[in-house]
Image: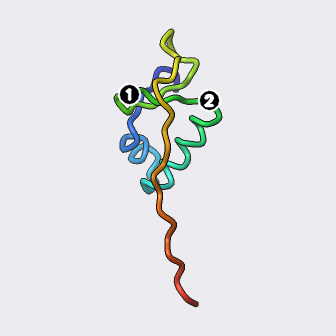
């Protein structure tokens, strides 16, 4: 949605997904330069507004899950 600005937690609640999956998706969209993340943690579309210079790139701090023995 044009003009929409969401934090990680807001996006997670909107899409109804767990936090780690949401972070992976947002990181991928930032990496593809579809979104950028502002210093205040809000994600925006790169093409929205005149302020479309990324302040920093988002990186997930995920730990691999231990697999259960079958």
Q: Quadrant of the C terminus?
A: bottom right
Q: On the rendered structure, is 40 left or right of 11?
A: left
Helix, strand or loop at disc 1?
loop
Residue 46 versus residue 19 in the image, above or below: above
Q: Which residue does the image show at 54% across and 25% down from the upper left? A: 45
Q: Which residue does the image show at 50% across and 76% down from the upper left? A: 66
Q: Which label's residue is closer to the chain start, 2 or 1?
A: 2
| Front residue (pair 22, 37) | 37
Q: Position of residue 38 (x, y in %)?
A: 42, 26
Q: Position of residue 68 (x, y in %)?
A: 52, 83
On residue 6, which mark appears? Answer: none
Q: Position of residue 35 (x, y in %)?
A: 55, 30
Label 2 and label 1: CA atoms lie apart by 16 Å
Q: Which residue does the image show at 44% across and 51% down from the upper left? A: 16
For label 1, count other residues whose C-alpha is less than 10 Å away and answer few (under 14), some (14-19) or many (20+). Answer: few
| Front residue (pair 28, 18) | 28
Residue located beneath label 2 in the image: 33
Helix, strand or loop at disc 2?
loop
Residue located beneath label 1 in the image: 39
Residue 5 versus residue 61 in the image, above or below: above
């Amino acid at each position: 949605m044009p003009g929409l600005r969401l934090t990680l937690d807001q996006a997670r609640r909107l899409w109804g997904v767990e936090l780690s999956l949401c972070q992976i998706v947002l990181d991928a969209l930032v990496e593809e330069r579809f979104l950028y993340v502002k210093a205040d943690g809000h994600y925006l579309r790169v093409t929205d507004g005149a302020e479309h210079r990324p302040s920093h790139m988002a990186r997930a701090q995920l730990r691999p899950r231990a697999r259960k023995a079958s």
